Amino acid sequence: MQTGKIFIIGIGPGASEYLTKKAIDTVKTSDYTIGSTRAIELFDDVQNKIAFNVKELLEKLNEGVQLACNGNTVSILSTGDPGFSGVLNTVLRISKEKEFPNENIEVIPGISSLQLAAAKCHIQWDNANVMTFHGRENIEDILPVINNGKTTIALPSRKVKDMAQFLLDHGVEENRKVVVCERLSYPDENIVEATLKDIAQSEFTYMCIMIIY
Ligand SMILES: C[S@@+](CC[C@H](N)C(=O)[O-])C[C@H]1O[C@@H](n2cnc3c(N)ncnc32)[C@H](O)[C@@H]1O
């Protein structure tokens, strides 16, 4: 096997101003760059683009790892940071299956949407309950911590309103302060502060961070 290199690159929350120089330079010198269309469009200088939609994710990640097995340098783009509800574990699993050497994989961190939400709301997040329910059904894991006195910052599993309703159904006080950070860093960024009860009656896109105080 002629071994190449895989970079797993965090691209930040969405706006190009949050891309790191390291991400830009790495993509520039990679033979192939794989990512969502939105992610690839952030980079001006890309050699061979492999864009995918959500349904094609696994197929394209497999293709990317195979290209690296064949000797190419491959950049795989991940929203926010690859290690927080990102593609890191999936790429590591595929690489292991294909016996691609771990030492030829480099992770380039990005600014997570969760970090940007914390920054926007002036939250020292080392003292927060940091949780992700993205693509998972472990939503009840929030219940043991929701009243532990710390702020909870979460990537919702379902619609924000459903998550709020779940908390109400499980006895969380209806006037609890919630901030929803939607489409952070985009021109239509929307940050809403309301009570849990009001959030349970509000519509948001899937691209949200929910902060429960
Ligand atoms: C697959 S997860 C990726 C998380 C990513 N690895 C990170 O560190 O931000 C996608 C979820 O992240 C959150 N997210 C990603 N970008 C966001 C943004 N610009 N504004 C608000 N939430 C965002 C949303 O909850 C979205 O459903």
Image (spheres, grey):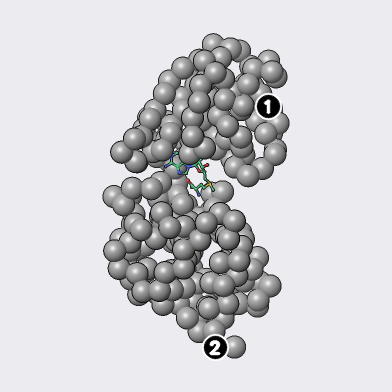
Indicate the quadrant containing the N terminus: top left, top right, bottom left or bottom right: bottom right
Classify residue 119 by image quadrant.
Answer: top left
Residue at (36, 58) in percent of width and height: 41
Q: Which of 95 and 186 lies nearest the eye of the viewer?
A: 186
| Labelled disc at residue 103 | none
Query: Can residue 148 be spotted in the picture?
Result: no
Residue neighbourhood size for the residue with mark 1, other residues' Cα within 10 Å, grouped as few (<14), some (14–19), many (≥20) = some
Q: Note whether 118 is above or below 85 in the view shown.
A: above
Q: Amino acid at mark 1?
A: Leu
Instruction: Name the residue: 31% across, 38% down.
Output: 187
Q: CA distance from mark 2 to mark 1?
A: 49 Å
Eye-nearest disc, 2 or 1: 2
Name the residue at 38% across, 48% down: 14
Cβ of mark 1 under 8 A from ligand 1 = no
Q: Amino acid at mark 2?
A: Gln
Residue marked by disc 1: 143
Bin the neighbour count of mark 2 within 10 Å (Cα to Cα): few under 14, some 14-19, many 20 and up: few
Circle 1: element type: loop
- Left or right, residue 111 beside residue 211: left
Residue 3 in the image: x percent, y percent?
54, 84
Q: Can you say whether 94 is above or below 152 in the image?
A: below
* Upstream in sequence: badge 2 or badge 1: 2
Residue that badge 2 annotates: 2
- The residue nearer to you, when weighing 82 against 169, is 169
State if disc 1 and disc 2 touch (CB < 8 Å): no
